[in-house]
Image (cartoon, helix red, strand yellow):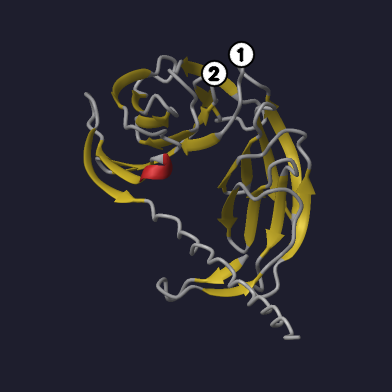
Amino acid sequence: MVADLADPGRPRRLASLSLAGAAMAVEGSGTSLLIASGTAGVQLVDLTDPAHPRKLDHWDTAGYARDVLVRGDLVYLADGDRGVHVFRQAAGRLQHVSTLGPQGKEAHAFQLALEGSLLLVANGPAGLLVVDAARPEQLRVLGRLPVKDTARGVAVLGKRAAVADGTAGLALVDLSTPAKPKETGRYKPERSVNRVVLRGGLAFVANDYDGLLVLKAPASGDPSPVGMLPAPKPARAAPKQAAPKAAGKKAAPASKK
């Protein structure tokens, strides 16, 4: 779906486009849109006319495309148990550049983050992967960091990263030495941590059914809670009322003889 957000309080639907797969993540690049489409791989859509989006190209990656990043003409795709793919977009087409296959036992690329030439991969039970992406045609693993549950999300800001570690909470990571990423702090809320965004000294955490959790994210030491925005409660269906019983017919009075 394409929406007009000129008035954020009243978003207006402009158009929709039916595509294969499940839209797991999107990222814009000029008048193009890249979509990580689950079992359908990655799709390239033209938004030159937002009211009439048009599919330009599609690459079936054979994995489960969960996240997509765009930097210039390069497209990075987290493809589940098939690892990470790099494409180049040119003239409305996607050209495959390279693939970094699955790294480690139970590896599953969930999400990507890019800082300069450093590519971070939330690699499922296999942990955090630190990759040198200076040469897109030959991605090179620099370092790894084990996790306690499942690395589902990752964010990076300078030489600091945050890993959404599922039921084990949020881990803060020092990337000063990319070959040896080091956990510097952790916070474990009651529910799973699924995604995270870093802004300044704060971490904004998608905390499962509990909603949005805001944490202080110090350079060293454990994060601490600042605030919470609860997830909206699902509307309860009105209880069904019993259908009124049909009035029974009265028996005809016995005739007097």
In terms of secondary structure, where does tag 1 sit? loop
Image quadrant assignment for residue 9: bottom left
Q: Are marks 2 and 1 in contact (CB under 8 Å)?
A: yes
Image quadrant containing the N terminus: bottom right
| 170 with respect to 20 (left or right) | left
Residue 208 vs 17, above or below: the answer is above
Q: Which residue is mark 2?
A: 126
| 172 with respect to 227 (left or right) | right
In terms of secondary structure, where does tag 2 sit? loop
Q: Which mark is residue 114?
A: none
Tell me residue 17's x, y (percent).
71, 64
Disc 2 residue type (three-letter): Ala
Q: Earlier in the sequence, mark 2 or mark 1?
A: 1
Disc 1 residue type (three-letter): Lys
- What residue lies at 66% left-to-right and 74% top-to-bottom? 49
Q: How far is the residue under mark 2 from the one under mark 1?
A: 6 Å
User: Which residue is at the front of the view, 232 or 223?
Assistant: 232
User: Which residue is at the front of the view, 50 or 224?
Assistant: 224
- What residue lies at 42% left-to-right and 43% top-to-bottom? 209
Image quadrant assignment for residue 208: top left
| 89 with respect to 66 (left or right) | right
Image quadrant containing the C terminus: bottom right
Residue 250 vs 63, above or below: the answer is below
Tell me residue 102's x, y (percent).
65, 21
Tell me residue 29's x, y (percent).
58, 56
Q: Which residue is mark 1?
A: 105
